[in-house]
Image (cartoon, helix red, strand yellow):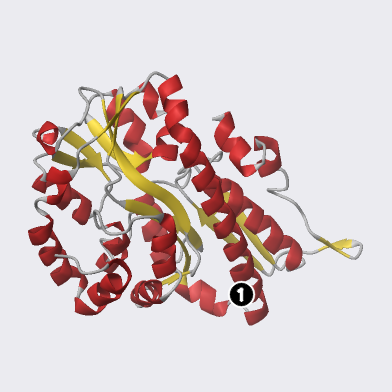
Amino acid sequence: MNSLLDATGLSRRSVLVGTAATVFVGSRARAADYTWRLGLSQPVNSPNFIRLKEMTDRVRTETGGRLDISMHGGGVLGSDTKMLAMLQNGELEMYNAGNVLGPIVPVTEMPGLPFTFKSPAEVFKALDGDLGDYIRAELLAKGIYAFRWGGDNGFHHLTTSTKPIRTVDDLAGMTMRTPVQEMTVDFFQALGAVPKKFPLSQLYQVLKDKTCDAQTDPLFLIVLMRLYEVQTYLSLTNHWWSGFTFTANAAAWSKLPDDLKAVVERNVRISALAQRQDVEKATAEAIGILQAKGMIVNQCDVSGFKTPLGTFYAKWKGVYGTKAWSLLEAHVGKLT
């Protein structure tokens, strides 16, 4: 865990200092014109929380206390599904969304299609640009304002408690914890696994209880969530990418004065770019950390994973639509 904290150059103490700070204007304390809450399920020692905490501190300072955004990490406000509902209902002003937006806006799942993007740089070229613009417009139509600059989660690999995954045949009948996205469920079903949907907040427990034998996540998150305590094998597959979409309730955002919006947008970008660097560094360190914790690491032959992709892509092209699909293929090439 220390290495992840070191990757950001921050300590737990520096993250939490100033959480309830009062901003002084001249010699008098000023009450905030806008008091918002920011919810996220990621732990308080994660790059997400740390960098967003920096963002909220800067916003409070640069607006002279007019906008005060309080942080609520580690799922203290409830599951991702609950926080997303709160965001839509106006009970929560800001939310850092992982792979949970698909049930509302299916096209948000597109960047995570298996074996499409090859690197985070490729992903963010699309998401910071035209593909991201399309996705953000679809979210806005559902009352969710998505900031242009999102965070990285990294490329996924498989961990198991029963046996290593060397080929696709090893997935047959294996219970697999997946996010709530139907696309991820569909993919693992096509490979012969038995997917079970659980929120991130329950991930450790369902693996500990053997409710699921296996799971899919990026390397640094396997470290951060201490999955080495409940999983034995790490099989390197690099099968898809996932990230974070930083959002606000669209109605609340529209009521914010333009000068405050500009401060928030600028600081969201600063924090997102720093978070991406944190994840890149933590990912590079992760395999060594996991091996030191006793995990057995193997390179998986993923050729069999790609066998059902023709039919799979055709199905999900129909779900996401031809416009979005053409934007995706402009970045990654023809998908067949």
Q: Nearer the viewer, residue 220 or 117?
A: 117
Query: Can I make out residue 5 in this image?
Result: yes
The amino acid type found where label 1 is placed reads Lys
Query: Can I make out residue 225 in this image?
Result: no
Q: Secondary structure at mark 1?
A: helix
Q: Position of residue 213 (x, y in %)?
A: 21, 28
Q: Position of residue 39 (x, y in %)?
A: 50, 53
Residue topped by disc 1: 261
Q: Quadrant of the N terminus?
A: top right
Q: Nearer the viewer, residue 103 or 281?
A: 281
Q: Is 276 placed left or right of 144 in the picture?
A: right
Residue drawn at x 9%, y 33% is 173
Q: Quadrant of the C terminus?
A: bottom left
Q: Position of residue 324 (x, y in %)?
A: 26, 75
Q: Residues within 10 Å of mark 1 (few under 14, many from 20)?
A: some
Residue drawn at x 9%, y 48% is 190
Q: Position of residue 202 (x, y in %)?
A: 34, 36
